Amino acid sequence: MKKLSNKKIYIPLFLLFFSFSCFLCTFLVKESDYFWHITAGKYMFLNGPLKEDVFSWVLNGTYWMSHEWLFELFIYFLKVIFGNFSMLIYIFSSLFMFYIIIYLYNKEKINKNLFFTTCWIACSLIFILVMQARPHFISYLFLSLTLYFILDLVRNEDSKKIYFLPLLTILWANFHGGSSNLGYLFCFFTFFIGLFQFKFEKIEAKRLSKSQLKKLFIIGFISIICTMINIHGIKMTFYPYLNMLDKTMLENITEWAPTDINNLTHLPFYVLSLIILGILLFSKKKIQLLDITFIGLGIYLGLKSLRFWPYLYIISSFFVFNYISKFKFDNMKFIMIFLSSFLLISSVFNFDKVYSEINKENLHVDKKIIDTIKEVKPKRLFNYYGYGGELIYHNILVFIDGRADLYSENGVFTDYLHIKNMQYDYKELMNKYDFDYFLVTKGSTLEKYLRTLKYQKIIESNGILLYKKV
């Protein structure tokens, strides 16, 4: 009877995971960076791994820390096979696999509490805010596997899943090297917390066995070495830390900005934090030190940068089920099937919008301007940051694009900001770069300035203008 019961549970759970993956994909947004990722993948397919800039005129030939090179090759291959539907396939697969990993780890608790499971899966709507076909979804999946391997060892000292972590780290260092340090960091965090054993009020720490501690330390150390197995070698090991110390990027890129309590669009992040903390605090069970430490780390990362909030949801998914008492809800399986059906129907009705989004060949710079730029063949084009990816996609050399780390490291990002905002030494910088054309937004400070000087307007379309230096 038990086996039959479990089989009946699998169907509504599978539908729930499937429908939420489909529904979240309806919020997929195509953004500028996708274009240069695809172009980089195509270039590498034809010429081999990229280790220097080939897309800008200002830094052409300069060393480039292409920490996402394997993702770019991967997403390009997907596009060759599936066309623009590759975006949907990539995002859907990442989400669905994440749900499956969470289920495999919490299998018994999920089967016994379908009501809370449905509520918790609904909280994955937090992913809506990051629905872009970029390498961060690979990191979400890799983080899920990392926690699964580590926490399975904590739960069972004979577990051998931890031995897959070094291999996963190698993949991480090549698909999305900027986050590849998380694998060994979580290993060492678990090792350190596993040294303690105490009870204090509601907090409880349980010491890990010598075998568990030994495995965590050795695998963590091996994983550090594994971050060096990539086209950039040991530089990748230090890259995540150097990247997070770059003040220029932290202050000027929206997705890197810290969370602002006064910004209403950031409210869902605080709500998620309160839900998770509320589950722990109001539970009758003791709060494990490891659990609250990992959740605290997820909150810290989210407060530090907006792009890290999904990490909190992923981390918490391995712990929250431990603190929920069984809640019996009649006909829950039918409710799950009804909810899944509603989400699938909603996804179908939104398909036209998604289809239109994934087939966009431009976001800002339309074909008229692209054709004009190709015709005039600028040698030193000035363009806005958000336009760079589309220009690269159309084989136009840029002044700046979404590879902020490359431009920040070489001082170009700061120069770009001074010119764009007409601050400090902008006149000297304009003479230094000797731009022959400017691609700017209508009504912007720089556009008004160009209008009053000896610059000729070549074309205007959809609020974007191309000026020529006379």
Image (tube, helix red, strand yellow):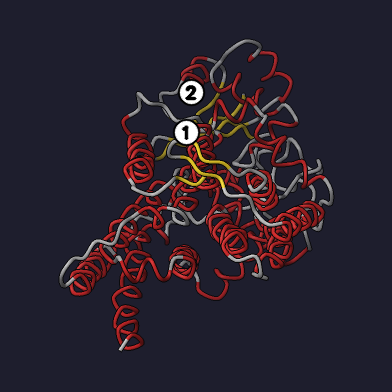
Label 2 sits on residue? 447
Drawn side of residue 346 relative to residue 233, left or right: left
| Residue farthest along the left direction in this orientation | 330
Q: Position of residue 450 (x, y in %)?
A: 52, 20
Drawn side of residue 110 relative to residue 347, left or right: right
> Relative to 351, is 311 above or below?
above
> Relative to 182, is 99 above or below?
below
Q: Residue at x 36, y 87 (%)?
A: 3
Q: Which residue is drawn at 57% across and 57% down?
A: 147
Q: Is mark 1 on a helix, strand or loop?
A: strand
Number of marks in the image?
2
Label of residue 13 in the image: none
Q: Quadrant of residue 407?
A: top right
Determine the CA span between mark 1 and mark 2: 8 Å
Q: Position of residue 428 (x, y in %)?
A: 70, 14
Q: Quadrant of the C terminus?
A: top right
Drawn side of residue 5 relative to residue 439, left or right: left
Q: What residue type is labelled 1?
A: Leu
Q: Position of residue 441 (x, y in %)?
A: 45, 30
Q: Is mark 2 on a helix, strand or loop?
A: helix
Q: Which of 44 and 470 is in front in this view?
A: 44
Whether label 1 touches label 2, CB < 8 Å: yes
> Relative to 438, is 54 above or below?
below
Q: Where is residue 52 in the image (x, y as percent from the top left)?
A: 79, 47
Label 1 sits on residue? 465
Badge 1 local density, few (<14 within 10 Å), some, or many (20+)?
Answer: some
